[in-house]
Image (cartoon, rainbow, N blue to C red):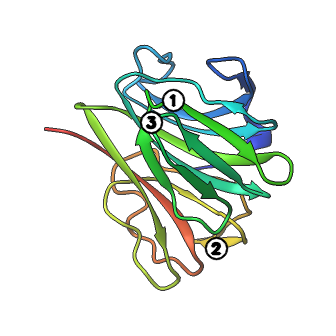
Amino acid sequence: MRQIRRSDLTAQPWKNGGGLTWEIATFPEGAGFEDMLWRLSMAEVASDGGFSAFAGIDRTLTVLSGGGMVLDFAQGGSVALDTSAPPLSFPGEAVVSARLNAGPIVDLNIMTRRGAWSHRVETVAAGERVPSGTLALVARDQPVAIGDRVLHPGEVLLSDRAQELEEFIARHTVLAVIVRRLE
């Protein structure tokens, strides 16, 4: 298991150049946007604007910090997201624009190649067992004790092998990122 802080990662420009992203993990390791099968990252949305398009990718976004934002979907509808909102899943090719409520936000993104891998992000409450297939645990809005480690908001505990995180029972609310290969 590896504990990862955003300060440990290198900022990279978004695919569309409109913001910054910090890659936590990708599979296969070192894969780019065109050949990745899954990718876990954090992104800073510092101004209103469009999201990068990822054809053939399913993605889920969860706000970790900041005043929140509203996502406007070109095909209709808007969704308000803040640190208390549930994770939002949508197709990567959707045309989406963000409107910030009160300054920059940081969000967690998990993306999987449609038809090859799937994912979900779950909130695991205190006293609940971490779900099977968990790739990462993320502290959202308060420090989280996991085994002998403490994750501070926005920090990630990344699994190095299958079922490594499933042995834990959450002592505080935590986000679990579950990834699985489709058969």
SS for dot 3: loop
In the rendered view, tell whether residue 69 sits above or below residue 12: below
* Amino acid type at image mark 2: Ala
Quadrant (top left, top right, bottom left, bottom right) of the C terminus: top left
Q: Are marks 3 and 1 in contact (CB under 8 Å)?
A: yes
Q: Residue at x 49, y 18 (%)?
A: 33
Give whichever of discs 3 and 1 has the lower sequence position: 3
Q: Residue at x 57, y 75 (%)?
A: 173
Q: CA distance from mark 2 to mark 3?
A: 41 Å
User: 67 and 3: which one is in front?
Assistant: 67
Residue under label 2: 145
Residue 158 numbered tag: none
Is 8 left or right of 38, judged from the image as shown? Answer: right
Q: Alpha carbon of mark 2 to alpha carbon of mark 1: how far? A: 38 Å
Residue sticking out furthest to the right: 103
Decide if residue 131 is on the left or right side of residue 60.
left
Task: Classify mark 2: residues with Cα within 10 Å, few (<14), some (14-19) or many (20+).
Answer: some
> Hey, what amino acid is under mark 3?
Gln
The answer, for residue 117, to whether it is visible in the render is: yes
Q: Secondary structure at mark 1?
A: loop
Residue under label 3, please give it: 75
Is residue 15 left or right of 95 when viewed as pictured? right
- Which is in the foreground here, disc 2 or disc 3? 3
- Give neighbour class at mark 3: few <14, some 14-19, many 20+ (Cα, 10 Å): few
First along the sequence among labels 2 and 3: 3
- Give the CA distance from mark 3 to mark 1: 8 Å
Q: Residue at x 67, y 23 (%)?
A: 14
Picture coordinates of residue 179 (x, y %)?
36, 46
**Residue receiving disc 1:** 95
* Residue 71 position by quadrant: top right
The image position of residue 36, as x and y in percent, is 42, 22
